[in-house]
Amino acid sequence: MTHTYKISGMGCDHCTVKVKQALESHPEISEVTVSRNPDKAVVTMKQHVQTDVLQSALDKVGGYKIEES
């Protein structure tokens, strides 16, 4: 299953790399594409992962906020 999320707090291309790596660290996530303009992440999952779990992963790498779009 694939979900698209709005990501806030990204200010540069390095931020997209940090967000991608943080989300990919979850074992149920198989693929992540992060872009700016618009700031979003397209996440492919083996099983659904709750948004608060994804937020916890992002909290470890910076001040990013994830929300369903």
Image (cartoon, rainbow, N blue to C red):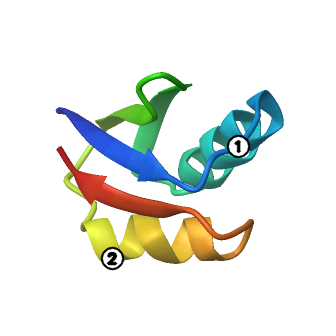
Q: Can you say whether 23 is above or below 50 in the image?
A: above
Dot 2 or dot 1, earlier in sequence: 1
Give the quadrant of residue 21: top right
**Residue shown at the point (46%, 64%) measured from the top left:** 65
Q: Residue furthest right?
A: 14
Residue at mark 2 to residue at mark 1: CA–CA distance = 22 Å
Q: Residues within 10 Å of mark 2 (few under 14, many from 20)?
A: few
In the image, 11 versus 49, the foreground residue is 11
- Secondary structure, mark 2, is helix
| Amino acid, disc 1 | Gly
**Image location (x, y in percent) of residue 58:** 58, 65
**Residue shown at the point (74%, 46%) measured from the top left:** 18
Res. 48 mark: none
Q: Can you say whether 53 is above or below 69 in the image?
A: below
**Image location (x, y in percent) of residue 56:** 51, 77
**Image location (x, y in percent) of residue 52:** 33, 76
Q: 61 left or right of 4?
A: right
Residue at the disc numbered 2:
52
Q: Can you say whether 3 is above or below 64 in the image?
A: above
| Amino acid, disc 2 | Asp
Residue at the disc numbered 1:
11
Q: Are marks 2 and 1 in contact (CB under 8 Å)?
A: no
Q: How many marks?
A: 2
**Residue shown at the point (70%, 75%) measured from the top left:** 60
